[in-house]
Amino acid sequence: MPVPPAPGQTQPSIAIVGGSITGPTLALLLHQSGFTRVSVLEASPATFAQAGGVIGLDHLSLATLDTLGIHQDELITFPSERVTAIHLTDRTEIGRTHSIYPGRNTTWHQLNTALLNRLPAGWLHPGHKVRALHPGPDGKAVLELAGGGSIPADLAIFADGRRSTGRKLLDPTRRLHYAGYVAWRGQYPRHLPDLCAFTRYEPGTGQFNIFPILRKDATTAVDWTFYLNLSREQFTNLTGYDPTHRTYLLPHQIGTAARTLVLSEARRLLPAPAADMIDATDSWNAAPVLDIDPPHRMGHSIANAHALLLGDALAPVRPHTARGANHGILQAQGLAIALSQHLHHGANLNAALTGWQERYLPAVHDALRLGPRLAAAMGLGHTAPALIPA
Ligand SMILES: Cc1cc2nc3c(=O)[nH]c(=O)nc-3n(C[C@H](O)[C@H](O)[C@H](O)COP(=O)(O)OP(=O)(O)OC[C@H]3O[C@@H](n4cnc5c(N)ncnc54)[C@H](O)[C@@H]3O)c2cc1C
């Protein structure tokens, strides 16, 4: 049963920007904790529309989702915990090593669908792109929408991803930096019955990962990611964009020149069956890998209101860390607890938010440091920029 607000407390109005993973997780956790005035503003006009591949969720994230009634059988089609690394020289296997991932793999689509399906009616607002934030006359934070209109809130919470509008508005000096390589992704439309482990090919320079998935149309396929070095100039020549501006490439944005280059590198670095898998996949997407100046805070004051950054909006981390979605989910869990202590037990809100930030920022700093080290071991990207003192 939802606990009523503590004496003297009123339900705050909460606007969450971003309807991917972090935003809907937070909304559901707030719903569970008895918050009633919550909106999720999502720029994309159609829900469930975005692409996205395998996401490794650790045990804490899985347990958090479980408390929301999202059990593993809804998310995890292929329950293997095993990771097999295949070491290559001249496209030939020279050995393999095995490890165990402390969690399970789902897909972005399964996770996003499970979350959005559970949002209370009227909470999700697709096609609501936030473009600005300013103090309102009554002390609230006012979110301005790109299509016109504005939404006042006691808490404006940005979970709007790698190119976060919230980060640009609240923490404008922190920059994204291109890490010097790109994650090319696709779904090879066949079932490989022998593929159980998350399998990583390591050619010395680059990395090729495969894992089976359940697709939107309920067929099984092999999700692949090919990490490949690409200079900023090459990226710009191939796409017409700077990699810190075009942070995701959709299938129609990957032209013949990019495809030809990636395929020739796949043929140079990978065994023929792996390169064939890439070749036989019609529709690719891609994400240039990015670093970011480390965050020093997650919360900001706007008049008498609070504006917060979570998940990739706070700091995208390199994909090899498998931390991005996990950070978003755990930060959401911690924030829901802090806000609930305020609403239901009268805890001081500033102190609750400071405690939340002190607990979750160090993990972000650790992952920002770890990513470049993992990539360097694969011959990927620039030498780690000294973003954060050790
Ligand atoms: C190749 C690859 C592999 C990965 N593997 C893993 C893994 O194994 N484990 C893991 O934990 N993480 C992994 N990640 C990272 C993970 O995908 C991200 O960390 C995660 O998607 C971040 O979720 P988010 O909800 O914070 O942001 P996003 O998923 O980026 O969502 C942001 C949302 O905000 C919306 N939005 C943006 N701007 C606005 C605006 N102005 N107004 C309204 N809405 C807006 C967007 O449309 C989007 O829906 C991987 C990433 C990549 C690229």
Image (cartoon, rainbow, N blue to C red):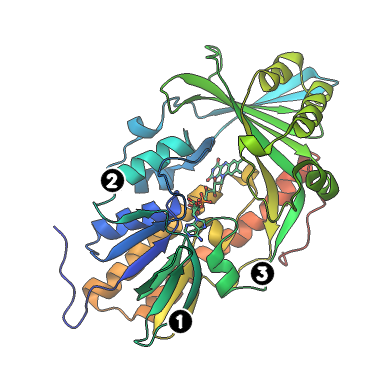
Question: Where does label 3 land, which residue?
Answer: 174
Distance (Cα) linking label 3 and label 1: 19 Å
Q: Residue placed farthest to the front in the image?
A: 148
Q: Residue placed farthest to the top in the image?
A: 193
Give whichever of discs 2 and 3 has the lower sequence position. 2
Q: Is residue 243 left or right of residue 209?
A: right
The percent position of residue 259, horizontal first and vertical second, equals: 75, 29
Give whichever of discs 3 and 1 has the lower sequence position. 3
The percent position of residue 22, horizontal first and vertical second, equals: 44, 53
> Is there a contact, CB below 8 Å, between mark 2 and mark 3?
no
Label 1 within 8 A of ligand 1 by Cβ: no
Question: Where does label 2 land, which residue?
Answer: 118
Distance (Cα) linking label 2 and label 3: 34 Å
The percent position of residue 265, horizontal first and vertical second, equals: 81, 28
Amino acid residing under circle 1:
Ile
Instruction: Identify the residue shown where x is 42% and y is 44%.
Output: 46
Q: Is residue 266 left or right of residue 299?
A: right
Instruction: Identify the residue shown where x is 16% and y is 65%.
Output: 3
Label 2 within 8 A of ligand 1 by Cβ: no
